Image (spheres, rainbow, N blue to C red):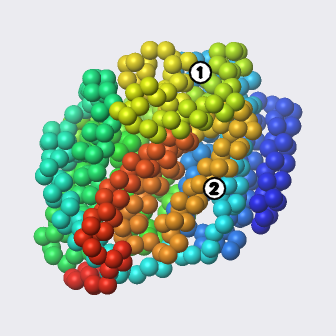
Amino acid sequence: MATPMAFLLASLFGVTLFGLGYDLLPASWHFGWFTGFYLALGLLAVHGYRRGRFLDVFAPLLPGLVLLYLYAAASALAIEVTGISNSGDVISPGVLRPYYLACLLGGAGLGLGSVLSPHPGSDPFSRALGPEDGRFLRILWVLAPILGCLCLPWLRESFDVLHVKGYVQTAGEGRLIKQAMGSSQPLQEVFLTQVPRVLILALAVLAVVRTRNLGARLLGAGVLFLHGATLILGGQRGILAMFGAFLLAFWHYRIRPMTFPALAGVFVAGFLMTSTLSFVRVTSDPAEMVRLLGEGLRSGDTGFLAFRSSTEFAVGQNLMRLIDGLDHGQARFTHGASILTEAETYIPRILYSGRPLPMSERFLEVFYPGIREEGGGLGFFILMEGYWAFGLPGVFLSMVFFGWALDRVYLAFSRNGMTDFSAMWYGYVLYSCVFMSIRTGLLGTFKVALMVSLPFLLVKACSRLAGRPAIPTDPLPGSSR
């Protein structure tokens, strides 16, 4: 199964066989039937991808396949048991067949796109600590404190562990602020909060692992602790996951490579963390959080830890709602027009006030009127854009493109080995394009990746303005690896 054509034929044969067997098996076997075929397609994809290449567990294919299955399976399990989505919609059993087919085709498309991407046998761990790492650290020592001071009013809440607002309060306030500020709110969030925060966190990590000064190490560790604690107390699952991806990528590429069992442990820990936060984030008081968790465990109320009950993984149910709506005339296939309108959303609204709504918001407009106006959202499963455009073929083709594009991004970072700079940058891109994309949609993923790349593009610009070569020759004094 080394060639893309062989993998394509095997995938299509497997999906066809699944569909034929699905109709013959009792309903109680359907989920296991789907899991078996998804596992087989995933193993074929990894086998085809690894031939002649270095198999890196943080390459997009492996976590992408795992996450797609987790979200798809959790959503399906809940419907198999209750028949009712988290939004209160009754999902008919007939919807599950095209849903399972879409998930299998999505996984197969992701695998085929990755296999199609030409890839040299490069080793992302081959780069030793060098002068370019020293250049990065010196720029951060100047840039991060300056931007931190200038943006302190907007940045303070990211590290103020003593005055953390509860998630319910911040979510409500965030919606009101978004409505009041309109098109300028995303720009403020990106340039006055996200950019300085990323640079400060990058400096904190390097202060811990790349300097010998005890004071600098303690200060860096304190900054990382304050940010992590603030996110946990505030129930900010998304930003916490991004912070974790950033730290894991740096550890994986610059400290010690992670194995697949370690990656599996990360997924389990991430699931337990997000599920627990969903249960206790009604408050920001750590003692109250511990009390709520303890009472839940003692009373046997552990439903929040059940895989199928996780609100985080329920976004696949929105694809079921879309399938049902298309079947009953509540919506129509866009035949590709939605792809063009989604591309227009890359233009900032401050420059294009009449730009169309992204597909995630159009979904709310059609199926859940009123939620968008209140600032709410339900997530947008990654397979929905392709399905809404062309049905099952659209799912497969869109995921082939997505898998190919992700692997090209990975190759751009790993071709010559990861540096401190590229490992940190890749951590944020990995979160945006893989971890976050499953529940936020396909095309919008790259827009988010561009936004999280701004701090690193700023560092590159500062390096060029300083008149130094991209890879300087001066050594890094006082560093350790």
- Indicate the secondary structure of the residue bearing disc 1: loop
In this orientation, which residue lies closer to the viewer: 363 or 21? 363
Give the labeled residue for mark 2: 404
**Quadrant housing the C terminus:** bottom left
Q: Nearer the viewer, mark 1 or mark 2?
A: 2
**Residue 110 versus residue 290 in the image, above or below:** below
In this orientation, which residue lies closer to the viewer: 314 or 196? 196
Residue 447: % across, % down: 46, 44
**Quadrant housing the N terminus:** bottom right
In this orientation, which residue lies closer to the viewer: 47 or 3? 3
Residue 338: % across, % down: 60, 31
Residue 109: % across, % down: 70, 49
Is 465 on the left-hand or right-hand side of 408? left
Residue 160: name its quadrant.
top left
Q: Tell me which label, 1 or 2, sits earlier in the chain.
A: 1
The kind of residue on which mark 1 rests is: Ile
Labelled pair 1, 2 in contact (Cβ < 8 Å) = no
Q: Which mark is residue 84?
A: 1
Is 220 on the left-hand or right-hand side of 115? left
